[in-house]
Amino acid sequence: MTVRAPAPRATTARAARRAPADLPFTFADRGLAQALAAERGEPGWLRDERLAAISAFEGLPTESNQLYTPYIDLRAADLFGVRPYLTTATAPAAADAPVPAGTSGIIELREDGIGALSLSPAARDAGVVLETFGAALQRDEATFREELLAGHLPADDKLAQLARGFWSQGIRLLVPDGVALDEPFVLRWSGGVAGRALLSRTIVHLGAKARAGIVEELLGPSDRVPGEGDQALFGGTLEVDLGAGAQLNVASIQDFPSNLVLFQHRHARIGDGASLRWALAQLGSRLVRSRVDNVLSGDRSTVEQVEIVFGGESQLFDLTSYTRHVGRDTTGNLLSKGVLLDASRAYMKGMITIDKTAIGTDSFLGEFGMNLSKKARSVAIPSLEIDQPDCRRAAHSSSVGPIDEAQLFYLESRGIPPDEARKFIVLGFLEPVVARVPLEAERDRLRALLEEKWNAGRAATAAA
């Protein structure tokens, strides 16, 4: 009797499983950097700057801080098919667009095009510059080169080096010494076209004793339809340099579509007696990885930062904040708040560093999460690193949990229905950012977006 061995079963090769920290794209290489320089006719110094950034990018881990390594997870992003933009517009097709009421100027960038770019007469007469990187390179190459090579971005952050090496669009806003503008500038970015990657940089410089405000809008495409299923990438920086005694308020509303992956970096260098206020709202995108760096280099400098997250479905928000006190008698107040529905996740990580030179520091970091679903997950990791014991204050606080039942009971005892009471508590929890938005129309829009997300989450819960 002959026994035949069973025929081998046909199998399909299984794709290699990605680790949580593996980058979800492969387009970032020297060939792309050289193509960017060649297609745009960039000077040799800019090509060399791109290549230097790529060398740093290639040698860095995705997360350089070992304390935060367990909390990185990029598996929800699939950007292997995206194509970065090589060339972008440097000026709008139609000049002299009207300036929105109550603003000092607007620049609107729609993927690779420019929808609007204009300044108010007061800003123009004061010598304010608002332009794209391409226009700056053509108009004043020497000054632009000095700014770009100043090295504001952290050398240890891989995704900051990604923007440094591969940007295709940028904004440059310069406010001269002593210029005080009560009305903010609007910087509007539109992204989310399926299969495309937009990498950008924004440089903001305020001279000594200058005062200004910025409203940053990060929105979905208005005139193009996002593809179904295909993801898009937006990678951007906001690099702030404040001269002595300068004052800047920045409000950002991020409501990108659900097919977009966002890599974001903000860096601020704050001079003597200068003050910076951040008000950051994160609502949209499939996955957000954001980092804020504040360097209080000048004596008596101040930073106030409030960031909120409102997550739903399976969104993931990975937020890190670094604040370094270098000058004497500096002040930092930083607050992060997250509200999570469905199976969304938020990692809120913060580090305050007080250098030996930072005598008289007053700094506080608070991180608070509110989970509204059993599947939601919040992680809060506030940290301190203190090398100067002579501080006025160095403290942190954190908590994660559901809605406070005592607050809910109080509102219900006043005749408010349970669902309405929950909504009031949640929206009140997020109000600190809303109240700091300098334009009334933008405050109303942000409140409407928050309420819309709350209603969508409650409807999904009721349907389940």
Image (tube, rainbow, N blue to C red):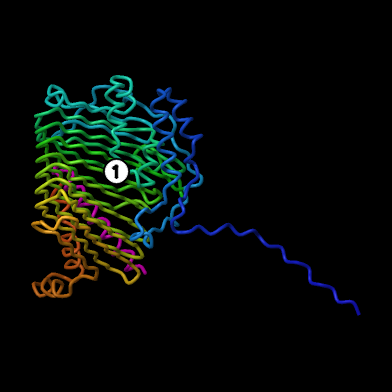
Which range of residues does the magenta coloring cover? 438-464
Q: In what quadrant of the picture does the N terminus appear?
A: bottom right
x and y, in percent, of residue 2 in the image: 89, 77
Q: Is 208 part of what is drawn in magenta?
A: no
Task: Say left or right for 194 vs 405.
Answer: right
Q: Residues within 10 Å of mark 1 (few under 14, many from 20)?
A: many
Q: Residue 410 appears in which quarter of the rendering?
A: bottom left
**Which amino acid lies under the numbered mark 1 shown in the image of this protein?**
Leu
400 in relation to 201, above or below: below
The C terminus, quarter of image: bottom left
Task: Residue 402 in the image: state x and y as whole percent.
Answer: 24, 71
Q: Is residue 451 magenta?
A: yes
- The foreground one among 150 and 230 is 150
Left or right? Give the position of 143 relative to 62: left
Residue found at the far bottom of this picture: 1
Name the residue nearer the viewer: 323 or 215: 323
Secondary structure of the residue carrying numbered label 1: strand
Residue 388 vs 235, above or below: the answer is below
Residue 78 placement (x, y as % from top left)? 47, 51
Q: Main secondary structure of the magenta part?
A: helix
- Residue highlighted by disc 1: 218
Q: Nearer the viewer, residue 149 or 239?
A: 149
Image spot of residue 452 (x, y percent)? 26, 55
Above or below, 63 against 421 in this view is above
The residue lying at 48 percent from left, 30 percent from top is 35
In this view, which residue lies farthest toward the right?
Answer: 1
- The mark tally for this picture is 1
Viewer-closest of 308 and 328: 328
